[in-house]
Amino acid sequence: GVALLALTGLPVAWATIRGMFRGHFASDIVATLAILTAIALQQPIAGLVIVLERCERGSTAAERYAVLKGIRLFEQSLLELFSAGALTGTTHTCVGQETVAVGVLSAIDRGRDIVFSNHRGHGHFLAYCGEVERLYLEIMGKSGGVCGGRGGSQHLQIDNFYSNGIQGGIVPVATGMA
């Protein structure tokens, strides 16, 4: 599947690739998806670490759109991986809700605000920190994941970002931290 994806070539810029291609901007969604899928399937491409630019108060509309597209691509790749049997358990995507993640995370004060998310929090997480590779690893239960592979798709924590997979379960956590 990965080699086939790279052949179709749809041009849209969305992710910054660091490591071997440090500083270059990826301009091919499908080739980038092939790279992300290779990482998710534990077939890493030597020297690459994949991250999205995170949303900031000063982000331009183009930068926010790039994050939005990156979130959509990530979520669609999860659905593909799940359909292919590469993911165990379940995953709840935020397809169709990407603008909420980008809009809210673009408005927060990172030095002061704490973000509480829900069971469809991948988009919020990616807009918050951009840690694509570590989120893939977390969802796949791998030790390099955000929470060491123990939180899965719905229980994520990094810096001042928290999510919970239980409907309404984040409310008492947020109340307790307020």
Image (tube, rainbow, N blue to C red):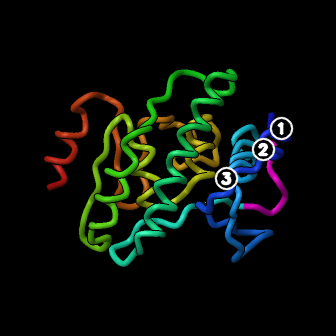
Tag 1's secondary structure? helix
Residue 127 image position (x, y, % from top left) = 43, 58
Q: Which comes before the other along the chain, label 3 or label 1?
A: 1
Q: Which residue is mark 2?
A: 8
Q: Report the disc number at residue 47.
A: none
Q: Amino acid at mark 3?
A: Ile
Judging from the image, what secondary structure is the residue with disc 2 in?
Answer: helix
Q: Which residue is mark 3?
A: 29
Which amino acid, by three-letter code, is at mark 1? Answer: Leu
Given contact means CB atoms under 8 Å apart, are the residues at marks 2 and 1 in contact?
A: yes
Q: Say which element carries label 3.
A: helix
Could you say where residue 6 lies in the image, as x and y percent from the top left?
80, 46
Q: Which quadrant does the C terminus fall into?
A: bottom left
| Mark-to-mark CA distance, 2 and 1 | 7 Å
Q: Specify the quadrant of the image occupied by residue 26.
A: bottom right
Nearer to us of marks 2 and 1 is 2
How far from the left and from the top, in percent, is residue 115? 29, 55
Tag 1 residue: 4
**Distance Cα–Cα, label 3 vs label 1:** 13 Å
Instruction: Name the main secondary structure of what is drawn in magenta.
Output: loop
The residues tagged by marks 2 and 3 sit, at their Cα atoms, a distance apart of 10 Å
- Horizontal side of residue 82 vs 126, given as left or right: right
Q: Position of residue 81 (x, y in %)?
A: 65, 30
Q: Is 125 in the magenta?
A: no
Measuring 57% from the left and 41% from the top, which residue is drawn there?
Answer: 138
Q: Which residues are magenta?
A: 43-48
Few, some or many C-alpha atoms within 10 Å of disc 2 (few <14, some 14-19, many ≥20)? few
In the rendered structure, the answer to whether residue 108 lies left or right of residue 61 reads left
Residue at 55% in and 47% down: 135
